[in-house]
Image (cartoon, helix red, strand yellow):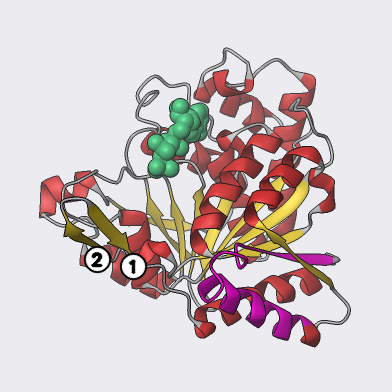
Amino acid sequence: MKITLLKGDGIGPEIADQVVRILDTLNLPFEYETYEIGQNAYDKYGVLIPDEVIESIKKNKICLKAPVTTPVGKGFRSVNVGLRLAFDLYANIRPAKNTDGVKTRYDNVDLVVFRENTEDLYIGEEEVIDDNTVEAIKRITKTASDRIIRSAFEYARANNRHKVTCVHKANILKKSDGLFLSEFNKIKEDYPDIEANDLIVDNTCMQLVMKPEQFDIMVMPNLYGDIVSDLTSGLIGGLGLLPSVNKNDDVAIFEAVHGSAPDIAGKGIANPTALLYSACMMLDHLNYKDEAAKIRNAVSDVLKNTDVRTPDLGGSSSTIEYVDEIIKRL
Ligand code: ATP
């Protein structure tokens, strides 16, 4: 089975190599097609996302992607957004769950954020009106809202989850978020077995910090999904632990939520767990559920029973030392 592997830049290659090392210990029938994207590809080929990357993902349907820097203000679009739009990967799914052995203020977090991935303020339609004024378009459509809301309910049903919460700001954005909320209220009628409620985004943030255990599946427009899911990463011990998938019904790109962390790139101390958990989501998706569970158990075992961990989790180990411990347990 062929998997498209994008090692990215910054800490990307350091963590991607270690995750592949871990997967290699499980004798999975994977072959990787590895490509450069982002600044590295731009320097070599003059494009951020080479055509061969698109072709490879189109063919393989599965991609494991390490973080890639989005060059600021260079006039080209974000690589991450570009890939999501190229494949119309409308669902960005970010599960936040406590890991045994990682001490946080909370021990009862087990929630999944469904972030709409194709519209809202991320369409990048901004206009300078005059010296004093810039406008940005927030686009919400029925089609995009319906499919992300429906996929959240379907996921809840398939994974024995009991509740879906719609997060919005429809009290102020009465038409745009109003549309998202009214679609939610229609669709929930098709899922009488799942509890459904809605919450204003600011209240959601407060509730998440006060009582995260009340949340199960959460579905929201693009920008709130970006912000709320970084908050949820804080609940479980930080960005180094939060995995994700960007998917539609055909193609899935698995990636860590965090960026390329240029501040620690090259130091050998990046936490590979978020990308590793993303790889576990990929294994679940491909029906290698036992292998995914083995990896998650090995991670928990290391974090629970040893002091080996990267500095972001309060340790002093290198990426490689940490991965060596995981591999010992596999
Ligand atoms: P983006 O805009 O692409 O999300 P960013 O610059 O906002 O990127 P990150 O690159 O995710 O943010 O980094 C935010 C902070 O978290 C940085 O201090 C970084 O070092 C830290 N961080 C992110 N990922 C990791 C990781 N895997 N291991 C350790 N620290 C990390």
- Dot 1: what SS? helix
Residue depicted at 67% across the width and 46% down the height:
205
**Do we see residue 27 in this rendering?**
no
- Tell me the quadrant of the picture where the C terminus can be found: top right
| Marks 2,1: beta carbons within 8 A | yes
Residue 140 on the magenta segment = no
Residue 165 on the magenta segment = yes
Residue depicted at 53% across the width and 84% down the height:
142
- Please state which of residues 290 and 148 is positioned toward the viewer in this rendering: 148
Mark identifier at residue 52: 2
Residue 180 against residue 219 in the figure, above or below: below
Q: Which residue lies most toward the right here?
A: 193
Residue depicted at 84% across the width and 47% down the height:
213
Residue 102 against residue 84 in the figure, above or below: above
Name the side, left or right, on which 37 lies relative to 153. Answer: left
Range of residues picked out in magenta = 163-188
Give the x, y percent position of residue 152. Answer: 68, 71
Marks 2 and 1, Cα distance to the nearest angstrom?
6 Å
Q: Which amino acid is tagged 2?
A: Glu
